[in-house]
Amino acid sequence: MLLELQRINVPPGQRVILQDVTWPEFETILEELGEHRGSRLAYEDGMLEIMMPLPEHEDDKEIIGDLVKALLEELEIEFRSLGSTTFKKPTAQGLEPDQCFYIQHEAAIRGQQRIDLSVDPPPDLAIEIDITSRTHASIYLALQVPELWRFDQGVFQINILASGRYQDVPESPNFPGLALKQMIPRYLKESKTVGRNKVLKAFRQWVREQIQA
């Protein structure tokens, strides 16, 4: 299986889907491919998806992640950002989010080098950029990730897990009272013309104004 995967060339923006991959094969693939790679993997009930992001996808992921970090820092909330860490529900599902954060449960996994969802909580917030990939909502549901941000061609959704499914809501329960549904896409768009540093500075100022209001 690994030799076959090494022969597969996935161009940026494309994905390859393999059927009938067993859970042991999936875990072996993860181990052999390692963490330092450009591809993203998602596994569900025997189907393995290998996706290679476009530069645009990676740019958006980094800026949005930086905005969330700035927000948490301004609010003085401890957090842990685990990027595209592989999260697995043994024998059935596994994926690598574009970005993820432990916020409410940061203390529960503080300092841990390995996250085991059989005993550890899932991330409090996961972020997916649907430029070149599709969001695997069913896998996030199985992993019980409580909040999922989805960006699809500029449209921003804040999804929360409620009544066994993801529901689109107007504001983030992790950041109540903040108009992030409007402001995150705005600052993301501005970063493409004025640059990252100016946008982060402006965003921090906006957050401070909301705190003081």
Image (tube, rainbow, N blue to C red):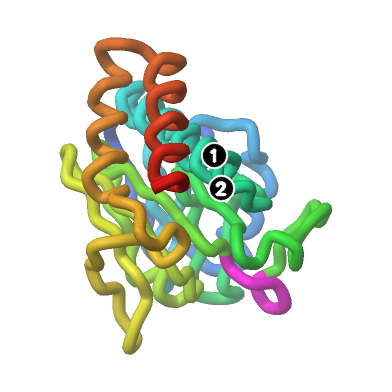
Q: Which residue is mark 2?
A: 75
Vertical arrangement, residue 149 with respect to residue 145, above or below = above
Q: Which residue lies most toward the top here?
A: 194
Mark 2 residue type: Leu
Vertical arrangement, residue 186 with respect to residue 17, above or below = above
Mark 1 residue type: Lys
Mark 1: which secondary structure? helix
**Nearer-N-terminus badge (1/2):** 1
Q: What mark, if any, has residue 46 been given in the picture?
A: none
Q: Residue at x 56, y 73 (%)?
A: 89
Q: Is residue 122 left or right of residue 153?
A: right
146 inside magenta stretch:
no
Q: Position of residue 177 (x, y in %)?
A: 35, 59
Q: Is residue 206 left or right of residue 28?
A: left
Q: Which residue is mark 1?
A: 69
What is the span of residues highlighted in magenta in the rendered image? 117-122
Q: Position of residue 113 (x, y in %)?
A: 80, 52
Q: Residue at x 45, y 45 (%)?
A: 212
Q: Residue at x 25, y 12 (%)?
A: 193
Q: Is residue 75 left or right of residue 32?
A: left
Looking at the image, how many numbered discs can be counted on the residues? 2
Alpha carbon distance from label 1 to label 2: 10 Å
Q: Position of residue 87 (x, y in %)?
A: 58, 60
Q: Position of residue 47 (x, y in %)?
A: 39, 63
Q: Which residue lies most toward the front here?
A: 213
Along the line of sight, the residue nearer the viewer: 100 or 8: 100
Mark 1 vs mark 2: in front: 2
Q: Residues within 10 Å of mark 1 (few under 14, many from 20)?
A: some
Along the line of sight, the residue nearer the viewer: 1 or 39: 39
Q: Residue at x 65, y 55 (%)?
A: 28
